[in-house]
Amino acid sequence: MKFIMFILFSIGLLNYCYMNLYMCCLLIMFFMLININLIFNLFNLVNMTFSIDFYSMYLIILSIFIISLMLMISMEKISMFLVMLLLLLLVFSFSTMNFLMFYFMFEASLIPIFLLIIYNGYSFERYEAAMYMFFFTMISSLPFLMIIIYIMENFYTLMYSMLEILQIKLSNFIFLVMLMVFLVKIPMFFFHIWLPKAHVEAPVYGSMILAGVLLKLGSYGILRLAQFFPFSLIKLSSWIISVSLIGGVVMSLVCLVQVDMKMLVAYSSVVHMSMLIASLMTLSKIGFIGSYLMMIGHGLCSSGLFYIVNINYEYSGSRFLYLNKGTINLNSSLSMWWFLLCISNFSAPISLSLIGEILMLMSLVSFNYLNLFYLMMLCFFSAAYSLYLFSYTQHGQMNQLYMKFFYVNVKEYMILFLHWFYLNMMTFCLNYFMI
């Protein structure tokens, strides 16, 4: 297995000429990972440092799948190298069983996306967006390193298995500082300023991997903290749930006044992550599974939305909603994919996000029935801004100065189809997501 992984990553990193072969190998490995889980229904222990369990399995598969779709997009050699390096770091981040190793991989994954924004961004403001992302993440992560050292000095282990047995109790302040690095990465309301800037300035493949996988590093980290420090987390859970749900409602209203398509999709990610954070804070099994399903569903849906927004941007030359009106008159086939992805964005049947959202609603209402008021508003406004995005771009009078008939090739349709297909067909395989 190690030799196969080494060959796969070496092909991608060392020689651009083998990229088509590499993409095929990635897809083969994607289906191999699925078959390992379906046939044997067990998790293979690699060694004491790297291992695959339930929570890391499907996030690794998601990373491989999103990167495979990104490889279909033409990009420069340096961008291809950075994408391959990012995949390597993501696989290590999700498969490591050591907290210190996770910290290093977590921080190292910031470097490739930072360089992608700097070298392939759209405007001069990309430097500001990259620095926002860098400093928000780094400032919050340095205290986290100090706490890791503190745990190592006092409890002599950083292995996941031992931390789960010890159930360490930390003070509220220390644990909040520890939690902050993941709340910034997700991001939570109040810490979300860097995300829209990064999405707007990043190239399409940068936005796909940022929304599809990198945000899941934060939710994966909180999920691990909930396993290792449940007694510390329960003290702060009510406060974090309140801020997350209220922040999600506020962000939903912000989405309704956006005029930039990419900015709207970026803010919608903050809305989805707000409910996901709140569900994780309930510390219930049903909340964990619902959040995990939402991670997978949101990763596929948001990546597809960023890609289809980029298709419109390439032909109209603008992300402004007013200049993209009436697209259905130019290409009705593309409008179908707009509709399918927009309804998936507010968890319409039969998307995987629907099941995740139902489970999250159950966990939050069982935690405190007063949460139902905010959850009703969240669900309503989520549908409102998704339909607002679809109706405003597809209907209305065309702007003749900017819009012209455009031909969408088979490759672009295939990328959109693969996003939508796995987002919806995984609903029929829910038994593999049950612990």
Image (cartoon, rainbow, N blue to C red):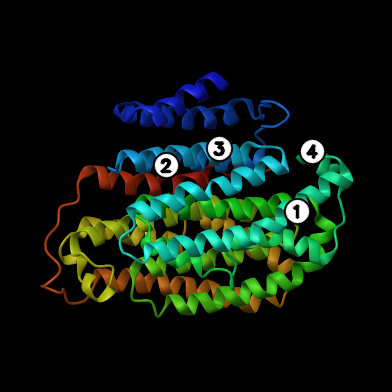
Residue 36 drawn above or below residue 157 = above
For marks 4 and 2 on the same chain, the one whose residue lies earlier in the sequence: 2
Residue marked by disc 1: 146
Q: Secondary structure at mark 4?
A: helix
Pointers 4 and 2 in contact (CB under 8 A)? no
Q: Amino acid at mark 2?
A: Val
Q: Secondary structure at mark 3?
A: helix
Q: Is residue 253 left or right of residue 240?
A: left
The disc label shown at residue 173, or none: none
For marks 2 and 3 on the same chain, the one whose residue lies earlier in the sequence: 2
**In percent of the image, x 66 and y 26: which residue is there?**
44
Q: Secondary structure at mark 1?
A: helix
The disc label shown at residue 83, or none: 2
How many numbered marks are there? 4
Q: Secondary structure at mark 2?
A: helix
Whole-percent x, y for residue 79 in the image? 36, 43
* Real-space CA distance between mark 2 and mark 3, rounded to the nearest whole angstrom: 12 Å
* Real-space CA distance between mark 3 and mark 4, rounded to the nearest whole angstrom: 19 Å
Residue marked by disc 3: 91
Q: Nearer the viewer, residue 255 or 196?
A: 196
Whole-percent x, y for residue 239 in the image? 74, 73
Whole-percent x, y for residue 285 in the image? 73, 53
* Real-space CA distance between mark 1 and mark 2, rounded to the nearest whole angstrom: 30 Å
Residue 341 drawn above or below residue 373 = above
Residue marked by disc 4: 161
Pointers 1 and 3 in contact (CB under 8 A)? no
**In percent of the image, x 23 and y 72: which residue is there?**
395
* Real-space CA distance between mark 1 and mark 3, rounded to the nearest whole angstrom: 25 Å
